[in-house]
Amino acid sequence: MTGDPEDLMSRKDIARRVKVHQKTVARWDRQGRLPEATFRVGKVKRWHRAIIELWIHRGGAGPVAGDDETPPKPPRPPKKNPPSEGDKPALTGAEGSLREQMGAQGEQPVEEPKKRGRNPGG
């Protein structure tokens, strides 16, 4: 491993090499999935190409211990059949008396409320 700048790789270079987005490489770095950076100045990190190639050869960012994988979703329960007329709950109190007033059909046409506002004619 020489000190040749062409032998050093940035996150962008690594992303191109393993064909993932740069943010993925940054996340791998935060999670400790990348090898330790060879050089670091502030937030800028560089890795030796040979180290990254060896890392890729050994499986790259494959699963690591403690990896937080999302568990599969449980299967959905089967859909229930819609309730039939006999399955309706009994109405009590005001709801019951309203139903009695409206009749057995339960639905009556609704009158539209009177409009309020300024009288345009006067």
Image (cartoon, helix red, strand yellow):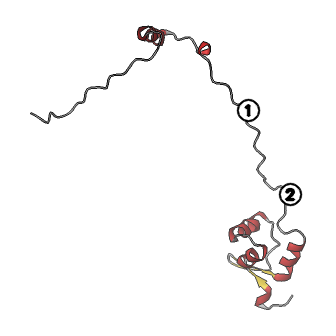
Label 1, on which residue?
77
Q: Neighbour class for label 1 at 10 Å: few (<14), some, many (≥20)? A: few
Q: Which amino acid does label 2 sit on?
A: Ala
User: Considering depth in this image, is 52 or 118 the residue closer to the camera?
Assistant: 118
Question: In the rendering, at what x and y percent does residue 53 appear?
Answer: 85, 78
Name, please, the residue furthest toward the left.
122
- Disc number for residue 43: none
Q: In which quarter of the image is the N terminus?
A: bottom right
Q: Which residue is drawn at 82% across and 82% down?
A: 49
Q: Residues within 10 Å of mark 2 (few under 14, many from 20)?
A: few
Relative placement, left or right, of 60 versus 120 is right
Mark 1 residue element: loop
| Viewer-proximal residue among 66 and 23 | 23
Between label 2 and label 1, give the one nearer the viewer. 1
> Residue placed at 80% from the left, 70% from the top?
34
Q: Quadrant of residue 82?
A: top right
Residue 65 has which mark?
2
Task: Please state if 21 lies on the left or on the right of 88 as rendered.
Answer: right
Question: In x, y percent, where is residue 114?
Answer: 25, 26
Q: Position of residue 79 (x, y in %)?
A: 69, 30
> Dividing the picture into quarters, in which one does residue 23 lie?
bottom right
Residue found 62% across the figure and 18% down from its top: 84
> Regarding mark 2 in the picture, which secondary structure is present there?
loop
Q: Which residue is drawn at 15% across and 33% down?
A: 119
Q: Position of residue 73 (x, y in %)?
A: 75, 43
